Image (cartoon, grey):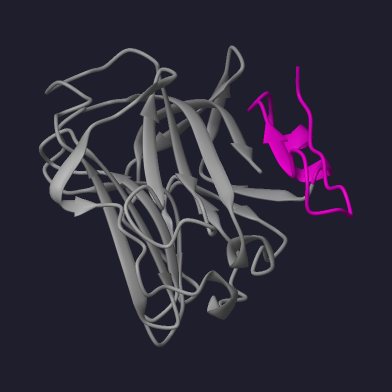
Amino acid sequence: MFQAKYPLSGSGILLQEAFASETELCKNGLTPTNISFSEGSGTWNGTTSYIQINRAFEWLFQQSFQLSFRLRPTDGQPSDSMMLCGVLDATANNRIECFILSNGKIRFNYQANGGMATADTANAIFADGQETFHTITCIANASIGGIGGLKIYHNGNECTLDITNDGNTSGITFANFDNTHKLYLGARNNNTVADKFFAGAIDYFTLS
C-alpha cells in the first residue's frame, strides 16, 4: 500500500503516502518528527508532531494542484485551529494552508505574491470530540481566476462554501507563487518553524 512517486512531468500523482512506518517514510524522502505508527496510520500528538516533505513544491503551487487527506481528528472542534498541511514564507505573502477551524469547518488558503484567496466550508465538517475517519480534498484551479478557483470536498462530495470566504481567486496570478520552503503535514512550516499542530491520525495523503 505504501507508495511515493516523484515523476519529472507536471502531471499525475506527485506524492502519495500511506503512513506505514517511520522507516518507509524516511526511505521515500519524508522526515517525521514525533509521529507514532500503528495499523497503517500515523498519529500526531497535537504539540510537536509533523512530517516534513524533503522537496520544495514551489513549481507545483504555481499551477493547478490538489491536496487530499484521510484523517481522524482527536477533537473535531479544537480549541485552536489545527493544520493538516501548510507552508508560509518569511514575508507572509506566499502560503498554502489547509486546516480545521475551532468550529469544525475546513479552511483552505492560497496566497501568491500577496494575492490571497480563502475557502471555508459553509457548514461544520467535524463534530466536537473524537471523530471517525474522513477524506478531505482541497483543489486550486489556476485557470479560473474567480469563483471556483478554490474548492473543498468531503468524502468525495463538493462542499458549499462560505458566502464571504468563497474561494474566489480573482486577481491572483498563480505563477507568482514564490516560496521554496518545504511543506509540512500535520503542522505548518512557518518560515522553517512548525506551528498549528494537528492532533489525531492520518493514514493517507496525496499531492498532485
Residue 75 locus on image (x, y percent): 21, 28
Residue 62 part of the magenta segment: no
For the point 61% across and 67% down, the residue is 62
Q: Which residues are magenta?
A: 1-28
Q: Residue furthest bottom?
A: 91
For the point 15% across and 29% down, the residue is 124
Q: Is residue 85 left or right of residue 107?
A: right
Q: Is residue 190 something one can see in this rendering?
A: no
- In what quadrant of the picture does the C terminus appear? top right
For the point 21% across and 24% down, the residue is 126
For the point 59% across and 50% down, the residue is 65
Residue 24 part of the magenta segment: yes
Q: Is residue 56 left or right of residue 70?
A: right
| Closer to the camera in the image, 178 or 147 | 147
Task: Specify the principal SS of the magenta part.
Answer: loop
Vertical position of residue 161 compared to residue 191: above or below: above
Q: Is residue 159 left or right of residue 188?
A: left
Q: Is residue 123 something one can see in this rendering?
A: yes
Residue 191 locus on image (x, y percent): 46, 77
